[in-house]
Amino acid sequence: VVAHHLTIIKGSRGISQKAGDCYCVPLCHFHHTTLHTVGEKSFWKAWGIDAIELTNKLWSNNND
């Protein structure tokens, strides 16, 4: 599993910094590489996933 920090989050990070862990999703190596190859927006759209909603669900489940 590879932790992917979303890059589509605006205002959540400084220059050259990753988004916080609350905007992180677990991906297998293959899908993480694919995401970086096709681009984040295209990747999530192809899978029909709202990545921000997913990170919100993962984060809230982790902190309950």
Image (cartoon, rainbow, N blue to C red):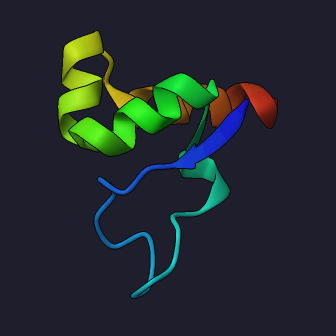
The residue that appears at 73% across and 29% down in the rendered structure is 1
Above or below: residue 20 compared with residue 23: below
Task: Pick the residue in front: 2 or 50.
Answer: 2
Residue 49, image x, y percentages? 32, 17
Q: In which image quadrant can residue 21 be found?
A: bottom right
Above or below: residue 55 compared with residue 24: above
The residue that appears at 29% across and 53% down in the rendered structure is 8
Judged left or right of residue 54, residue 61 is: right
| Quarter of the figure with the C terminus | top right
Above or below: residue 19 compared with residue 47: below
The residue that appears at 36% across and 45% down in the rendered structure is 36
> Residue farthest to the top?
48
Judged left or right of residue 28, residue 55 is: left
Above or below: residue 41 compared with residue 30: below
Residue 46, image x, y percentages? 21, 15
Residue 63, image x, y percentages? 80, 37
Judged left or right of residue 47, residue 26 is: right
